[in-house]
Amino acid sequence: MNRRDLLKFTVAGAFCSVAGAQRRQLLLVHPDRTSLPATYIIDYRTNHLSDPGFVPQVAEAPPSLLHLGHDVPFTAHWGPRALPLPVKDLSRYRLLSPQETSARTHAIESMVRRLHGTGVEIVFPYINSQQMGGDIEKRLGFWKFYDHWDEYLSFGLPPRPKADPAEWLQRDPNGRILFNNPAAYPGYAPQFFYSPCPNNEYWRIWLRFVVGAIARAGFDGVFVDDNIIHCYCRFCREGFKRYLRSRYSPRELRSGFGTSDVDKIEICFQADKPAWAMSQPAFIDYLAARYGRQELEKEFKIANLTNPSNLDRIGYNFLDWRAREFITFLEEKYSPEQRRRLFGTADLKRLGIERPEDHLRWFETQRFWAWSIADLLADLRRAVTPFNRSFVFVPNWGSIQTVRAVEGRRRQGKNVAEWARGARYMMFEENYQHGFPGRSVSGGFTVHDIQYKFALVNGARPVVLFGGPHGRASVELAHAEAAAGGGGCYVQNFYQFPEVRRAYRRFYERRPGLFTGFQPLAQVALAFFFNQAHMGNRDHLSQVYSIHTTLATEHVLFDFITEQTLNLLGRYRVLILPSVAYLSRAQEQAIEKWMRGGGRLIVPGAHPTFYGNAKPRPAPAFSESHADISPACSARFQWTTREGLPGLRGYVYWKQEDRRSRVTLHLLNYDLDAAHEPSPVRNIPISIALPEVLRHATVGKLSAFSPNSDDAPDLHGEIRSCRLSFMLPELRVYGLVEAVLLAP
């Protein structure tokens, strides 16, 4: 190492002086309370161990979290292998001998120690909860490792499971192997991509060992990719019954499912649209008309669609959308009478959920799959506790940026509230072409407030990954979103602009009191009931996404509220309940009680017409509530009354500390793009409605903070009519203002 590299480590060492305290802050998560934001780099290069410049590059501006690829003693989906270059040549991706595995493990341990020495707090690699590479017939990939399992027992590997890995895989309703992605996935060629079941006890035995080996190598956590489950195997059928027992009393079971005997309630497959479509000969013809033999061979490595196993190998994710297109095709082709005669129902979109009992089973089947992912994470946490009690799990949820993205994931084990019990952090993997915040290609603005707001209310810390054209200012704005969003991370997929990363990490760690332990301060709540998605209520999602954009553009301070957080309704004056079709009696009573206390309910779209168990109501709930959301956009709920600033967004938080209170305002300027620096916005009037308990408070100190300056100039402010008002002189990309309010 040369003198220049030593200097980098010396500078980086400044981050280590408060390492213990900062790491504890990074691990703290409290529902509905802000946490310390963090800087985060993802680096999937495959030559970390052989590149002498890797650690010094990290040391230039070490992130709080460093997310690596497959630099692990045992990969989850292949076994003990070292990822070669080029990755496409899987013939070189050979099984390592026990001696080579030991040497590689020692090299990994050394690398992790050096990375910690740069000031990185949390170093974690990649695993996958539902990927297995290989070839069942040729006994390649994971099967080759399984056949040599006993040679690696000295690493602490448990006894080899008696069940072949083929029995660890997800299954469709007919018991055939279910492929979530195409079996002939390009990254696995010439071998194949299989999907193990997260509930399968043998797969869990293996994952427990993999995660334990990662912890023993010195890592601080794991990134858990995919987390896709759409399985009807015997483990899922048994797990579904355990799940129902944990959620329902005997009386509730009888009311919802018609029986209190859980053993008589089966996991629901009748509503599975791809499974139904694959049973229809017309679906084969429908696909064959769109995909010729050459295309089938090129894309999926299958010769025809007449063999059911060939159809399976196309992959559930692909068939899901094609099945829905096929159903639309049938609805357009046949009259309701013809559909009833040919398929047994006139409404093909309600296949398998015509009865409330079956609709409830399908809802709980989807939620059970999400519960299964959380259960796996909790199981792995227990397994790794002896090695590292603060081990971090960062599961990949996928995209939540659009309604279509949510629709595609709610049937595959994705639910933020469920996952939050198994993971402190949660990744949202968004658009790689046009994902950076700022002016969007459509003429509006790309904003990641859904990720941060929804994670915060569910008690998770979001890490948001995206790509696309960017410049220094857009990278700064990406960091600013995490700072303003309540304690997440922008996932930087490169090492550019180290000065921005340094500035934001220094800002967080030097002033943690500005970021931790606050609750959102707003008087408007927007209901985001994710269970409506599991129920198939797309209208609710569409309205939530549309209304949230309207509120943000109108500079209204608002929070999401969920089914689980209705107990927080007392904070708000207005609740917007958009097309919530399914509402339990207990939820209805909570809203009614809040309304009797003076709360105003707005119901855009349809009113609740079903109870939470899918049984129809005798009459829609809240039928006298108004649908117009304009009262929620009035000046009393806005943080500024200045017009002509559609690109500005504001987030406000507060907390009480004995006889003083602290209010923080985060302001972001989205009016920028990758090619230009933003034009500063000057003289922004701020007026924030305060909680009633602060009506008689006075302003003790009002200060403006920036990641790019150690100075915190004072501002002049006042409280009048229970509103905090002041003028912000200038905003470039991001600014934070703290008001210390004193009790009278």
Image (cartoon, rainbow, N blue to C red):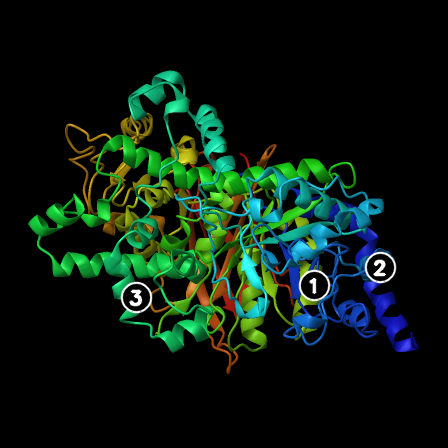
Visible residue check, residue 694: yes
Query: Which one is earlier in the sequence, the residue at label 1 or at label 3?
Result: 3
Element under disc 3: helix
Instruction: Quickly name the residue at label 2.
Output: 117
- Of discs 1 and 3, which sits in the foreground? 3
Element under disc 2: helix
In the image, 480: left or right of 547?
A: right
Q: Closest to the observer: 324 or 588?
A: 324
Instruction: Quickly name the residue at label 3.
Output: 287
- Name the amino acid type tagged 1: Asp
- Name the amino acid type tagged 3: Leu
Instruction: Quickly name the residue at label 1.
Output: 710
Q: Which mark is residue 520?
A: none
Q: CA distance from mark 1 to mark 3?
A: 62 Å
In the image, 501: left or right of 690?
A: right
Q: Is residue 658 above or below residue 728?
A: above
Q: Name the residue located 55 percent from the left edge and 35 percent from the top edge.
A: 743
Query: Which one is earlier in the sequence, the residue at label 2 or at label 1?
Result: 2
Q: CA distance from mark 3 to mark 2?
A: 56 Å
Visible residue check, residue 441: no
Q: Closest to the observer: 701 or 270?
A: 270
The residue carrying pointer 1 sits among few (fewer than 14), some (14 to 19) or many (20 or more) residues within 10 Å by Cα, namely few
In the image, 197: left or right of 223?
A: left
Q: CA distance from mark 2 to mark 1?
A: 26 Å
The residue carrying pointer 3 sits among few (fewer than 14), some (14 to 19) or many (20 or more) residues within 10 Å by Cα, namely some
- Name the amino acid type tagged 2: Gly
Instruction: Evaluate if marks 1 and 3 touch, with contact meaning CB atoms under 8 Å apart.
Output: no
